[in-house]
Image (cartoon, grey):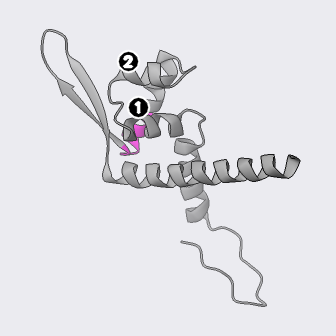
């Protein structure tokens, strides 16, 4: 997508295509709840009620909005099982699994950074 400028050359501005891609990415993972929802589904929490209990502070409305957004971006899939009480489960798509791996790496990086900050204060 972007290429590094050659030494001594000034970097060009982001193209419209790149800006659009970054906006889409921010729209999905820029929300404070999306990463948590994806991580929870990646850890096997698949039902809406379970997700709501697993993610402290998320409301039913916000959870449903995030699930719709993640479905629209094909990061998760929805499976409905009919019956007296219909059952809905969510699972990650291959792209969703890739994104969750990146989110987990970012979380690990944050933890390392926090630990270094604590060590420097002592």
For residue 91, which quarter of the picture?
top left
- For residue 32, side relative to residue 35 (left or right): right
Above or below, comparing residue 30 to residue 82 in the picture = below
Confirm whether residue 6 shows in the render.
Answer: yes
Along the viewing direction, whichever of 49 and 86 lies nearer the viewer: 49
Cα distance in 3D space between marks 1 and 2: 15 Å
Neighbour tally class for label 2: few under 14, some 14-19, many 20 plus, Cα within 10 Å: few
Disc 2: which residue? 49
Q: Position of residue 52 (x, y in %)?
A: 45, 20
Mark 1 or 2, nearer chain start: 2
Disc 1: which residue? 68
Residue stretch rendered in magenta on the structure = 69-75
Confirm whether residue 23 shows in the render.
Answer: no
Which label number is shown at residue 44? none
Q: Position of residue 116 (x, y in %)?
A: 76, 53
Mark 1 residue element: helix
């Amino acid at each position: 997508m972007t290429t590094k400028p050659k030494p001594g050359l000034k970097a060009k501005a982001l193209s419209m295509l790149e800006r659009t891609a970054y906006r889409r990415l921010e729209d999905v993972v820029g929300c404070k709840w999306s990463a948590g929802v994806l991580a929870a589904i990646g850890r096997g929490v698949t039902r809406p009620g379970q997700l709501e209990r697993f993610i402290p502070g998320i409301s039913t409305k916000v959870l449903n909005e995030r699930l719709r957004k993640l479905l629209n971006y094909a990061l998760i899939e929805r499976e409905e099982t009919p019956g007296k009480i219909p059952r809905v489960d969510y699972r990650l798509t291959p792209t969703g699994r890739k994104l969750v791996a990146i989110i987990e790496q970012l979380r690990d990086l944050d933890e390392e950074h926090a630990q270094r900050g604590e060590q420097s204060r002592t």
